[in-house]
Amino acid sequence: MIYIGIINVSDRASAGVYEDIPGKAVVSLLTEWLTCSWKPVYRVIPDEQDQLEATMIELADKEGCCLVVTTGGTGPALRDVTPEATEAVCQKMLPGFGELMRQESLKYVPTAILSRQTAGIRNQTLLLNLPGKPTAIGQCLSVVFPAIPYCIDLIGGPFLTTNEEKMKIFRPKS
Ligand SMILES: Nc1ncnc2c1ncn2[C@@H]1O[C@H](COP(=O)(O)OP(=O)(O)OP(=O)(O)O)[C@@H](O)[C@H]1O
Ligand SMILES: Nc1nc2c(c(=O)[nH]1)N[C@H]1C(S)=C(S)[C@@H](COP(=O)(O)O)O[C@H]1N2
């Protein structure tokens, strides 16, 4: 079975002040795109760096997720620490993900540059940050997803397949 982690990092969502819309949006997009069987491993936690690092490590090392997507906590506010936590648990960073997502988000909001969203590799897991705004989820995930299955191939993870009409991915011919 393929496991994919989703972590909504938000003080308010974790306190039940508002519904976890961003995390649910990630699950719904992956359900629409992926044709391989997969299961979400789902967490909603506050913007606490230690807790976030522990959760990312748990989903990667213990739950065996090949991909862990976080939502929220990427901005400049004092409590936004998702990129720091991501960098702390990764051996390798992939700055191209953040660059492309910010470029895409700029088509919608000039505040796109406030997101420090990034991605990186921890062993056989790809960690990816998305901003917490519900509308940002599809805008950001759809632009980087075409490269994700091949990235997971390269780190020795499972073979992800998609419905090409909904999400066209790219694997270079070897
Ligand atoms: N479920 C939701 N419903 C409506 N807006 C949301 C929801 N989740 C996030 N947002 C919006 O997206 C923004 C960013 O989300 P995020 O959870 O990272 O915010 P935040 O300001 O860091 O929240 P918190 O202070 O609770 O951690 C929020 O300021 C809020 O406007
Ligand atoms: N596509 C998209 N990207 C976006 C936004 C958005 O509304 N749409 N909001 C921006 C804003 S206002 C902030 S502060 C940062 C960080 O958001 P986060 O702290 O919720 O991760 O993401 C930015 N990126």
Image: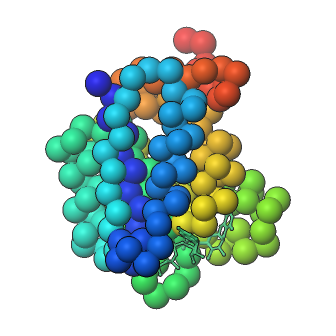
Residue drawn at (42%, 71%) of the image: 13
34 or 171: which is nearer to us? 34
At 47% from the left and 55% from the top, the residue drawn is 23
Query: Where does residue 91 sit, x and y in percent of width and height?
Result: 33, 51
Is 142 situated above or below 162? Answer: below
Could you say which is closer to the camera, residue 44 or residue 59?
44
Instruction: Estimate the x, y position of residue 71 in percent, counting from the top left.
Output: 48, 61
Q: Quadrant of residue 41?
A: top left
Q: Which residue is found at the position 55% from the left and 81% from the top? A: 76
Quarter of the figure with the C terminus: top right
Q: Residue 122: x percent and y percent?
A: 32, 47
Q: State whether residue 84 appears in this view.
A: no
Q: Residue furthest left?
A: 62
The foreground one among 91 and 37 is 37
Q: Position of residue 92 (x, y in %)?
A: 40, 50
In the image, residue 28 above or below residue 112: above
Task: Tell me the quadrant of the picture where the N terminus can be found.
Answer: top left
Name the residue located 65 percent from the left edge and 59 percent from the top edge: 136
- The colour scheme is rainbow
| Residue 132 in sight | yes
Q: Is residue 70 left or right of residue 141?
A: left
Task: Give the number of marks.
Answer: 0
